[in-house]
Each structure stands twice: as structure tokens, then as C-alpha cells.
Image (cartoon, rainbow, N blue to C red):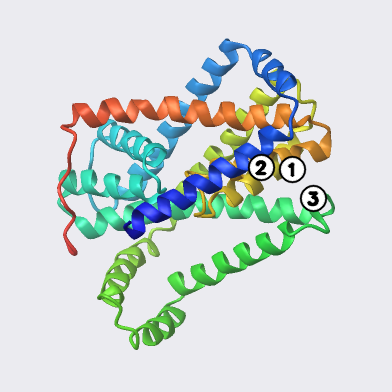
Amino acid sequence: MTKKVLTTLIKFIVSGGILYFLFRNMDLKMFFHDLRTVSPYVIIFVAVFFVCLQAISAYRWSIILKKDVEVPYIKLLAIYFIGMFFNNFLPTMVGGDIIKGLYLYKESKKGGVSVASIFMDRYSGFSALIIITTIALVTGYGHIHGTALPGFLILLIGGYTAASLVIWVGSLHSWAMNIMARIHFYGINHKIDTLYKTLMGYKGHKDIIIKILLLSFIVQAGVIIGYYILARNLGIEVSLAYFFFFIPIATVITMLPISLGGLGIREGAFVYLFTMVGATKGQALSLSLIWYAVMVVVSMIGGVAFIKMGGHAREIPEDS
């Protein structure tokens, strides 16, 4: 059994085990009742709303790319949905980014720019999420005091801050590269340094950084509002403020690479967090699973785009 197959199997067991535990300790009649209360029109609205958020994300990507290469927005939108499709149907969140990079290189012929743009797109979205999470941790600490969540979130925020300093502060980057130079691990030093030099091109374009951060906040806030709309239709009488606290925390926890696309971990986080403020286990689980189903269905657009664009892409060279 290969390492990749074993890793996928472990993730499958983790996701399946958590879901089994959640359903085993739940009133299934009430759960299905909660599911039936959701209006199909609301689900359609949320799906269309989610498509709009992905369109904004693709526009953010186009702003990042304009510094180095011109790619038609409609093409980038198709590539973005293809990335979504592979994120949902491959056992790793990185799969979609690799596919996006391959297609972008096919269009731009610039491998370094392709990789750097995808990194900046991810980084800006994660930065917005971390900022919202930090505010939520400070303002809502009392709700998770005494659990393992504060420690986990503080480590995550600290790690993000340290990594950001190494990326953007030249002296710290040089110090980190000097340490890594002693490792010589599969040429990773050269690849990191090449990516770093490309990223540094954005330091002189603060207008780009400000625009993509603002768009990232819009996307993250949009996701939270989408959850809130679904929750209200499920009968969850919880203030919108709690969603700005809980959704970022649940999203960050879902990024732990120990399950299939966060399945199971996300549902467990939703049940734990939302039941603290009055939602039933069935409502919290329904909210998470419906949103996940919407994401999977919307990502099918990427499957169609993948077929229309030939169903393949070239390999990105190490440089560009």
C-alpha cells in the first residue's frame, strides 16, 4: 500500500468515524425533520450566491495576475471552478491549486507567475480569515474558555504571523533561507527563493494588496452571511454576530489535513459551537451538511469546464 493510498484511507476513517459518532448520538427523526424544513428556494438562492462569491474570488485572482500577465477573466473564472471541482473530488485541498496552476501556465507560459499568483490568492483569503478569527477570539473568548480551541487558535495565529514576517521581511527571509540551506532537501531552497523573488514584486504594488484584501473580506463575509441565511431557514435563532465568530473558527479547524476535505471535522465543530448558543445538534449538523452539499454541486460547474477545456493541462516547469 502506497503512502498516498494509506493517507487517503486514514482521512476516510477519520471523516467516517466522526460522522458516525455524530449520527449515533443524535435523534435521527429530528435531524431529518430539520432537513425537510429547508426551502429548496433558499438552497437555490444560497447556491447562486455562492457562485457569485466564487466569481469575486476569480476577479481577485485576475487583479493579482494583471501585474505580470493578461488572461481573459472568463478563462480565469473557468479555471477557478475547475480548481473547486478538484478540491472537492480529490482527497487533498492542494489538488485544485495544482490543476489551476497547470491551466494558468497553459494560458500564460509563465510558471513562476502562475505559482506566485495562486499563492497570493490563497494568502489573501487566509489573511482575511485569520484577521476575522483573531477579532472573534478576542471578542468571544468567553464562549470557548476552558476548551482546547483558544490554544489551537493562538498557535495558528502565531504561526501565520511568523510565516508572514518571514515572507515579507527581507532580513528574516534571508535568516530562514540560511538555516534551510543546511538541509538541501530536494532543491526546495531554490524553489522557495524563486517564489520569494516573484512575490517581492507585489511589495511595490500596495494598491493590488489592498484591493485583494478587501475582496477577500467581502468573500469571507459573504460565506458567513450565506451560512446565516441557511441557518435562519433551519430555525436556528442565533444572532449574526455569532456566525462571524463561529464560521471562521470552524473553517480554520477544517483546514487540519486529517480528513477528506474537512468532512466530519467541520460537522463536529458546527455541532459543538452552535449547540452552545441554543441550536439543536440536528440543526447544526444539517447546516454544515447542506452547505457542503451546495459547495459540491456548485463545483460541478468546474467539472463541465474541465471537459470543455480538453480535460488536461501541461506540466508547469520549475521556472518561467
**In this rendering, would 250 be left or right of 126?**
right
In depth, the one of 147 and 116 nearer the eye is 147
User: Which residue shows up at 55% across the image and 48% down it?
Assistant: 14
Tell me if I can see residue 300 in this picture: yes
User: Which residue shows up at 68% across the image and 37% down it?
Assistant: 22
Image quarter hosting the N terminus: bottom left
Give the numbered dot on residue 304: none
Q: Secondary structure at mark 1?
A: helix
Report the Cα–Cα distance between label 1 and label 2.
6 Å
Tell me if I can see residue 210 in this picture: no
Identify residue for label 1: 272
- Image-quadrant location for residue 205: bottom left
**In this rendering, would 9 be left or right of 69?**
right
Give the numbered dot on residue 140: 3
Report the Cα–Cα distance between label 2 and label 3.
19 Å
| Image spot of residue 89 (x, y percent) | 37, 37
Q: Amino acid at mark 3?
A: Gly
In depth, the one of 130 and 3 nearer the eye is 3
| Image spot of residue 169 (x, y percent) | 46, 75
Counting other residues with Cα less than 10 Å from the Cα at mark 1, is it few (<14), some (14-19), or many (20 or more)? some
Please report contact status of discs 1 and 2: CB closer than 8 Å, yes or no: yes
Q: Is residue 128 above or below residue 302?
A: below
Identify residue for label 2: 268
- Image-quadrant location for residue 288: top right
Q: Amino acid at mark 2?
A: Gly
Counting other residues with Cα less than 10 Å from the Cα at mark 2, is it few (<14), some (14-19), or many (20 or more)? many
**In this rendering, would 37 be left or right of 62?**
right
